[in-house]
Image: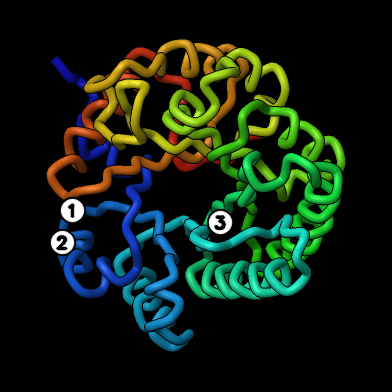
């Protein structure tokens, strides 16, 4: 039985929601429930909305005391691209996301590296140099916006690229967003322990969702096979308090996802969502 009040979990955590869905469908429900969103800025959002549209919603958030994080665009985004035009376009999109983050006073902005080993087998060194330079620029830009940049693991097969990036960029303004679901499905040749040993000290955010080890299902915690207990025990031992974002991909999964996180927080009470670690 869950003894930790779900309302407390809602207060502590963030829940992913694309901005267009937020505006078109969920804004009033969000205000009623007190949910704090991680606002997704996908290609449809950035093509449809202008800065004044975000300012309007940010003012509503301020009125109701809503906090938020931002998930930057990722489809077609490659900030380590070896094609200079692609890299330049990706950087413009990410800077746009950081401008929007400044409007909201967002706690963090999550980004993907865009790395895919199938494309860069013969250009890993060039790609690594490019993404380090890009992230240095974006970290400086994020500082002006008053937010932190969080680099999420997605298709990287192991932690070596993240380790090289964090070794080169020591600023605490760049943190690591650990996605255990992505690690299980897309980095199956490496283990959670390997990632924690390499870059665990830079964890500033977690994306919380479960799966069965085959597909990126985005199930509520406890409905899959992921070993959240080992991760949370590791964080608790070190007193780390990362931002935590529940990534439910449909409305019906939101409250089961929050309840699943609640069970974890019961077992590991030192972990407090909404704080920044790393």
Q: Which residue appears at 75% of the width and 65% of the height?
A: 83
- The relative height of residue 23 versus residue 187 in the rendered view (above or below) is below
Q: CA distance from mark 2 to mark 3?
A: 23 Å
Q: Which residue appears at 30% of the width and 21% of the height?
A: 212
**Do residues under tags 1 and 3 come within 8 Å of each other at their CB atoms?**
no
- Residue 148 appears left or right of 28: right
* Tag 1 residue: 33
In this view, the mark in front (2 or 3): 3
Q: Quadrant of the N terminus?
A: top left
Q: Position of residue 207 (x, y in %)?
A: 44, 38
Q: Quadrant of the C terminus?
A: top right
* Tag 2 residue: 29
Q: CA distance from mark 1 to mark 3?
A: 23 Å
Say the numbered circle drawn on residue 237: none
* Tag 3 residue: 109
Q: Which residue appears at 60% of the width and 18% of the height?
A: 190
Q: Is residue 204 visible?
A: no
Query: Label 1: few (<14), some or many (≥20) within 10 Å?
Result: few
Q: Position of residue 219 (x, y in %)?
A: 26, 32
In this view, the mark in front (1 or 3): 3
Q: Secondary structure at mark 3?
A: strand
**Do residues under tags 2 and 3 come within 8 Å of each other at their CB atoms?**
no
Q: Secondary structure at mark 2?
A: helix
- The relative height of residue 36 versus residue 55 in the rendered view (above or below) is above
Q: Position of residue 248 (x, y in %)?
A: 27, 43
Q: Is residue 28 visible?
A: yes
**Within the image, what quadrant is residue 42 found in?**
bottom left
**Within the image, what quadrant is residue 58 found in?**
bottom left
**Do residues under tags 2 and 1 come within 8 Å of each other at their CB atoms?**
yes
């Amino acid at each position: 039985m869950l003894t930790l009040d779900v309302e407390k979990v809602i207060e502590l955590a963030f829940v992913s929601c694309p901005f267009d869905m937020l505006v078109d469908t969920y804004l009033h429900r969000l205000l009623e429930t007190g949910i704090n969103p991680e606002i997704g800025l996908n290609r449809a959002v950035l093509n449809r909305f202008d800065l004044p549209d975000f300012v309007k919603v940010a003012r509503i958030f301020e009125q109701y005391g809503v906090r938020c994080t931002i998930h930057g665009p990722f489809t077609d985004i490659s900030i380590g691209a070896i094609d200079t035009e692609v890299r330049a376009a990706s950087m413009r999109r990410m800077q746009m996301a950081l401008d929007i983050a400044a409007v909201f006073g967002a706690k963090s902005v999550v980004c993907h590296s865009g790395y895919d080993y199938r494309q860069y087998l013969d250009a890993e060194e060039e790609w690594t140099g490019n993404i380090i330079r890009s992230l240095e620029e974006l970290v400086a830009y994020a500082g002006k916006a008053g937010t932190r940049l969080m680099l999420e693991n997605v298709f990287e097969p192991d932690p070596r690229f993240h380790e090289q990036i964090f070794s080169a960029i020591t600023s605490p303004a760049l943190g690591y967003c650990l996605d255990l679901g992505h690690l299980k499905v897309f980095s199956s040749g490496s283990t959670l322990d390997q990632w924690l040993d390499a870059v665990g000290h830079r964890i500033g955010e977690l994306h919380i969702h479960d799966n069965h080890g085959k597909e990126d299902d985005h199930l509520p915690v406890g409905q899959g096979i992921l070993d959240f207990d080992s991760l949370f025990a590791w964080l608790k031992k070190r007193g780390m308090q990362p931002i935590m974002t529940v990534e439910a991909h449909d409305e019906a999964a939101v409250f089961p996802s929050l309840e699943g996180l609640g069970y974890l927080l019961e077992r590991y009470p030192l972990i407090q969502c909404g704080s920044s670690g790393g």
